[in-house]
Image (cartoon, grey):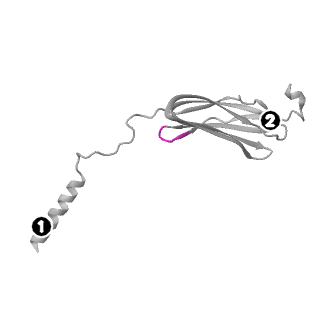
Amino acid sequence: MKKMVACVLIVAGFSLGAGCDESRERPTGLNIPVPPTEVTVRSPLPDAVLFADSSAVIEIEALGLIQAVGFIVISVNPIIDTLATGRRDFEPPVDLVDEQFVIQLPTLVSGSSLEIRAFAENLIGQRTSSETVAVFLVDCDVEPFRCQ
């Protein structure tokens, strides 16, 4: 019986020692530090007036190790609704992005408020979003004097 207990202790000790072997390789993730990600909506500017039933350009700038950029346009007045979204992927990731998206704006109530937000996704999949840019939509059929 003492011999069997000794064998079990020796085998258990050997197994525990093998699990703590310092010489084996362990996964470490990325070998480089990921720089901070910054993203900005460069156009349109805050409080800009956009025209209903026309196209608009959304310009996004992002810095970091960027693998994707995108945007969302939301109507917040009179109702909350997603009007447009877009995304562009980069392979391999890039460190500076200056992208333009062209969207078609719908006909909404003149004076409707829209919010535009951009996002950038870095090399490890973390998303950073921009400050919200608030703009106004004008229907030129209703308010032609604001469309000149």
Please identify the quarter of the rendering in which residue 128 is found: top right
Q: Is residue 6 magenta?
A: no
Indicate the position of residue 4 as horizontal and vertical percent values. Answer: 12, 71
Kind of residue at disc 1: Ala
Which mark, residue 31? none
Q: Is residue 26 above or below residue 134?
A: below
Q: Looking at the image, which residue is at 85% across and 35% down? A: 139
Dominant SS of magenta comes to: loop
- Which residue is painted at 72% across and 30% down in the image? 46
Q: Check if mark 1's residue and mark 2's residue have beta carbons within 8 Å.
A: no
Image coordinates for residue 72, horizontal then vertical, percent: 67, 40
Indicate the amino acid at tag 2: Leu
Q: Which residue is mark 2?
A: 137
Residue depicted at 65% across the width and 37% down the height = 117
Q: Which residue is mark 1?
A: 6
Figure quadrant of residue 33: top left
Q: Which residue is the extreme one toward the bottom?
A: 1
- The outermost residue toward the front is 91
The total number of labels drawn is 2
**Residue visible at 24% across and 54% down?**
19
Q: Nearer the viewer, residue 147 or 115?
A: 147
Look at the numbered disc 2 and give the secondary structure of its residue: strand
Q: Residues within 10 Å of mark 1 (few under 14, many from 20)?
A: few
Split into 4 quadrants, where in the image is the N terminus? bottom left
Q: Position of residue 89 (x, y in %)?
A: 55, 37
Q: Say whether disc 1 or disc 2 marks the residue closer to the N-terminus.
A: 1
Query: SS class of the residue under badge 1?
Result: helix
* x, y percent for residue 147: 85, 28
- Which range is magenta? 123-127
Left or right for 110, reference 36: right
Eyeballing the image, is 24 above or below 148?
below
